[in-house]
Image (cartoon, helix red, strand yellow):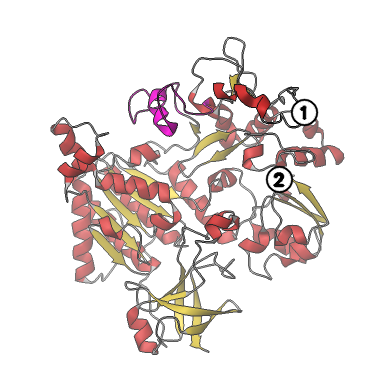
Amino acid sequence: GPERFYQGVPDAQGRLVGLMLDILRQGPVRTPAPAEADEADAVLVVGEDFAATGVRMALSLRQAVRRPGFELAARMKVPLWQDAAVRELQQDLRGPLFILSTCPTGLDDVAEVAHRATPQDLAQLAYAVGHHLDARVPGPAGHPEPLAALARSMADTLARARRPLIVSGASSGSAEVIEAAAAVASALQARGAAASLAYLAPEANSVGLALLAPRPFGEAVRLAREGGVDAVVVVENDLSWRFGPAEAEPLLGSADLVVVDHLQNDTTAGAAVVLPAATFAEADGTVVSSEGRAQRFFQVFVPGAPIQESWRWLRDLGRAAGRGEAMAWEGLDAVLEAMAAEVPALAGAREAAPGAGFRIAGQRVPRMPHRFSGRTAIGANLTVHEPKPPDDPDSPLAFSMEGAPSDPPAALVPRFWAPGWNSIQALNKYQEEINGPLRGGPAGVRLVEPTPGDALYVGEVPPPFEPPRRPGNDFYLVAAGQVFGSDELSRLAEPIAERMAAPFVALGPEEAQAAGWEADLEVEVELGGRVFRLPVAIRPGLPRGVAALPVGLGALRGLGLPAWGRLRRR
């Protein structure tokens, strides 16, 4: 039952995602869709390196920086799709982008301001910006004048903007950073600006998990230690990657372990039973993005037995255990209906795409293009008889080229193709105008909307960061996200694994010089009872007293950053 359903992510991460979700639902500021973020005319980034952790948002921010050039092109009647002409007009004309981060970011090259500080000090600076926008937002006491002047300058620029955008995320590991971003956005909203607030959740469906309101993982560990667990079911989650060696052991080592997964990993290696799950390409389902948009994904091909969707394995387990509700789960639509009844916050997910019974003139939507007419040649070495296409009980799509010839709703478009157009260029034929909305309405449905009003979201200003008393030994360790390797799944793909960097510990030049260390010198990093031997990497811009670890690389998993640690020469 619900009292035995736990999130498979660290408690700190779960709290941060829950905080972001609460702010977006209870606060007055709307979160934008990616295309809306492109339209921002002033941007403040608080505590996030989107070039490493959220590349789609990074693209939006680069587009926002180009906004003055787009407006100039519109006045000159140059179509925006003529990119070379627009760039020629734009030259060095840029919109304001302010980046407050702990580590250097991949967007610093287009930023008007790139300020480095610890998460606590970043939150202080953001609160100072909010205080200059609206006196009801608390400001830091005794802020140094250079930082106060920087806060005033950024506040004045944001106040002049028509569509200011504030963006943040969970990578800093700081609730104060998340709340400070909300304070700035709500202060702008109170001034009458069309402000927007965007947060980056750690993974594709982190918001969906938060909407299910699971219990904290730490409670499950305590229950296992107390002997209150007979069996554990882990669904598509390598707990050994997310947690330190000892954190998940009470669950993985002291109970009968059933794992439903599509990959072999350290968690499946210790399981009593492993049930083969379908990958996203072999299943239908729904994910909820950082925007709070529920989006449906559809099966590309049918896997061989005994592989099936995770929810079908859970249904079968429920039926074997005599759970009556599982008896009715024959198709995805039935599961969505049950979910809507049990979890009202996810009820709207039913509207993310038409149900399995949807038809156009009595016909399904074909997955395959007309060129699939040569399909009999695929297996001609085995037989010239064409087998019957598999049935799809969970969607209106057919595993065939036969079906309704007219344009389906946007959520059901299986491909972009049009005569005379190559590859993705055919997308233009599916839009109301070039780079405009899709015909047939948007794909997906928003589940998260703000609470109307002019109330401010105000948290508490954190105290300033205090550097360690023994420089060159104690350090405040922060996470440095990596494009290649910092997430659970991409690191398992060989082309991505080849591009992963070797693990390292990054220091600013001042800290390295004070300690007498140089690049590539191997040092010991002690954190939470674990010791790592890592080469030193020099990263100009890192604050004093701070060291950065590339999360997810090598043994650097389940670290619980930020946290105090110790560095020493071997």
**Label annotation for residue 533:** none
From the viewer's perspective, is residue 466 above or below residue 166? below
From the viewer's perspective, is residue 162 above or below residue 4? above
Mark 1 or mark 2: whose residue is earlier in sequence? 2
Q: Position of residue 115 (x, y in %)?
A: 29, 65
The amino acid sitting under disc 2 is Pro
Magenta highlight range? 413-442
Between 169 and 505, the residue placed more toward the observer is 505
Between 35 and 561, the residue placed more toward the observer is 35
Image position of 420 (left or right of 324) = left
Image position of 147 (left or right of 518) = left
Q: Position of residue 372 (x, y in %)?
A: 59, 24
The residue identified by callout 2 is 2
The answer to which image quadrant residue 89 occupies is top left
Residue drawn 27% across and 59% down? 109
Q: Residues within 10 Å of mark 2 (few under 14, many from 20)?
A: few
The amino acid sitting under disc 1 is Ala
Confirm whether the magenta stretch covers residue 434: yes
Residue drawn 28% across and 68% down? 141
The residue identified by callout 1 is 328
The answer to which image quadrant residue 102 occupies is bottom left
